[in-house]
Amino acid sequence: MATTAITTYHALTEAEAIALAAELFPEGARLECREIGDGNLNYVFRVSDQESGKGVIIKQALPYAKVVGESWPLTLKRAAIEAAALRKHGEFATGLVPEVYGTDEKLAYTVMEDLSHLTIAREGLIQGKSYPKLSTHIGEYLAQTLFHTSDFALHPFEKKKLAAEFSNPELCKITEDLVFTDPFFDYDTNDFEPELRQAVEAVWRNDALKLEVAKLKRSFLTEAEALLHGDLHTGSIFADDNETKVIDPEFAFYGPIGFDVGLFLANLLVQGITRDGEGRDTIVKHVENTWNVFETRFSELWKSEGIEDFRGVQGYRESVLEKIFRDALGFAGCELIRRTIGLAHVKDLDGIEDAERRIHSKKQALHIGETLIIKRGELASINDVTALLEEL
Amino acid sequence: MATTAITTYHALTEAEAIALAAELFPEGARLECREIGDGNLNYVFRVSDQESGKGVIIKQALPYAKVVGESWPLTLKRAAIEAAALRKHGEFATGLVPEVYGTDEKLAYTVMEDLSHLTIAREGLIQGKSYPKLSTHIGEYLAQTLFHTSDFALHPFEKKKLAAEFSNPELCKITEDLVFTDPFFDYDTNDFEPELRQAVEAVWRNDALKLEVAKLKRSFLTEAEALLHGDLHTGSIFADDNETKVIDPEFAFYGPIGFDVGLFLANLLVQGITRDGEGRDTIVKHVENTWNVFETRFSELWKSEGIEDFRGVQGYRESVLEKIFRDALGFAGCELIRRTIGLAHVKDLDGIEDAERRIHSKKQALHIGETLIIKRGELASINDVTALLEEL
């Protein structure tokens, strides 16, 4: 991108957005701009050619976050982290992340591929779409991004350089608090219907559960295994029947591989809870296929591109995958619980209009969440996980 | 320290060393300087007042390492890391690390407390000394430095800042290769007597052992639990009957807590192997006391200074200590093996003049090392560890 004369942060105007994007279009193109973000964390400008209809996206970080009406300061550095993560992951997950055309650290914006022909997977799933390629693509995305940024594929100098570059304390703190801490204590950030109070208080009193959550939090705080997306829920995925694109890695950092895997699985499970019959079967298959594709591709990469001297030792790959599996189930459990009773909910559950059904589904989410955390050492395969959904 | 006009790296002259240290002495003091290092990795200048005899140490890193005749380039940044680690650990382990008076990043030197009234613990132990306070002091040092630099005591912003600051890829690579990799494969860096070949080949063929070493290496590569010393063997400790000072933390980085604990225990065990009768009992007591003091003090700090929301959850502290214990045993096992057949040996074993006794002791070191690695999940307490020594 051309460098601009602008050097201090301000919200971009639509005219500025057009000027920034102009060089990506044919000379003389008639460009228009619309701000299409939800305004909570970022501005999202779509600049497009009025004739061809082709567009690009300029995403600009806001210097604060708005959640449930409140606003607190939030580092602009996240825009640079997001752009760098998109590029790094894009090296490996070909076609599964938007292309980045340019970025500016001071103004905290990234110019990237326009994906407006796709829909946010969470929205589509809620509408009952099946996204037949979603789990194959995400399984592939997980294997490619996580294997290639781990010590299994990178020289330790390169890995430690990346780990330092992707140090992301402010965004990690949000996860540490909202996923791993607050929902398990009677803290003000929590948000749940009175009908759930009894179930929630049971969580707060459940020391066996909290002990396991404490271990999972510790893993999140300390285990720098790979460059994670860090927030891989179905709202961070654009998709249609053929394409899948993972967006918004502003929470990217070096963390435990199972976290990305688990977050995605949890968001499928929460959708599965709201469905029945064939609709639920579709989700069951997506859950199983995500893990199976991930495991298969990770294993192939281990063999074809692994650099670890111990990679050929009998049982090592299996032991690594087993750890990822157990971690993923635990993290998925935390995600299910926090999306039900914590600060940030999901529309899959909150959007259920019938109150009784909504509360019932939320209780099921809590139940599956607790089971995944407590029994993550016992569930033998991904089919044991989907069995939890089928038993509902 | 006064800043000097010198800005590019060169080996300090004795006159320069005196000039650098002068301000720490009374005006007009008659200073003398002696280089007392072994010249492998660092220069060590002792500048002292000819009248009072009081001195200071100036340690300057060499831009290369010499090991068994070879020399390879080695980052000068390690001097800054060492000085920063001494200061950070000194905040918590009062009196157990040398005081740092000043440091210069370009010339890669640190001016610090003179400890020449003490002896290197390894040398003293080989001579049969008992150092009655050694294990109490090191248990305290381990608890204070490791607890206070962990997520259990630090705000995550501060912890992640330190973790990035203490990124130490080059020195970590030495450990990754020499402790966790090379000794377990038929690699050129290994060094052992022909009489050990059969035992060494058994190590190389032992896939069950190598699987566990692979897991331990992975933990070393990924688990950023606390600011480690990183090379806490008995050669990194100055001591006498009353005082103990931990020196040389140039391998400092954020790693698994059990690594520092395990390295120290392994170096006690290797000394214990060479002793019998009362001499061995002294070492047995040191091993047990190190762990017991560490565990007690860590638990006290957990209660008095812990900030983790989950710190009061039933069983969490015990689970953290159990993980540290298991990790420490595994790391100790790797250290025992690499000090016997890897590149860098210890004088405790190599110095045994009688060839048959030396080989026998080395086989015992290998045996205990393998047992600690394979059985680290089963050994129930530190007494089960010292039992391995007493069974010899």
Image (tube, coloured by chain):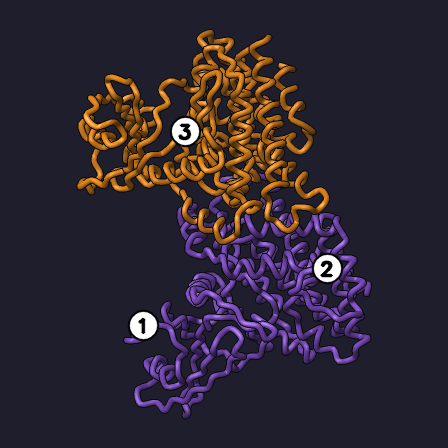
Chain colours: A purple, B orange
Whether residue A382 sits left or right of residue A1 in the image: it is right
Q: Which amino acid, mark 2?
A: Gly
Name the residue tied to disc 3: B247
In the rendered structure, the answer to whether residue B327 lies left or right of residue B46 reads right
Nearest the eye: A317 or B78:
B78
Proximity of marks 3 and 2: CB atoms separated by less than 8 Å: no
Gap between marks 1 and 3 measured at Cα = 47 Å
* Chain letter of the residue carrying label 1: A
For the residues beneath circles 3 and 2, the answer to whether they share a chain is no
- C-alpha gap between disc 1 and disc 2: 46 Å
Q: Decide: marks 1, 3 in contact (CB < 8 A)?
A: no
Numbered badge on residue B338:
none
Q: Are marks 1 and 2 on the same chain?
A: yes
Q: Residue at x 49, y 12 (%)?
A: B129
Kind of residue at badge 3:
Ile
**Secondary structure beneath label 3:** loop
Spatial separation of the CA atoms under disc 3 and disc 2:
48 Å
**At which x and y percent is residue B291?**
60, 28
**Residue under the point 41% across and 78% down:** A11
User: Which residue is identified by label 2?
Assistant: A369
Q: Chain of mark 3?
A: B
Residue at 57% x, 54% y is A257
Within-10-Å neighbours for mark 1: few <14, some 14–19, many 20+: few
Question: What is the secondary structure assignment of the residue under circle 2?
Answer: helix
Q: Nearer the viewer, residue A14 or B132?
A: B132
Q: Nearer the viewer, mark 3 or mark 2?
A: 3
Chain letter for mark 2: A
Image spot of residue A205 (x, y percent): 77, 53
Please report whichever mark, 1 or 2, sits nearer to the chain's N-terminal start: 1
Label annotation for residue A7: 1
Q: Quadrant of residue B385?
A: top right
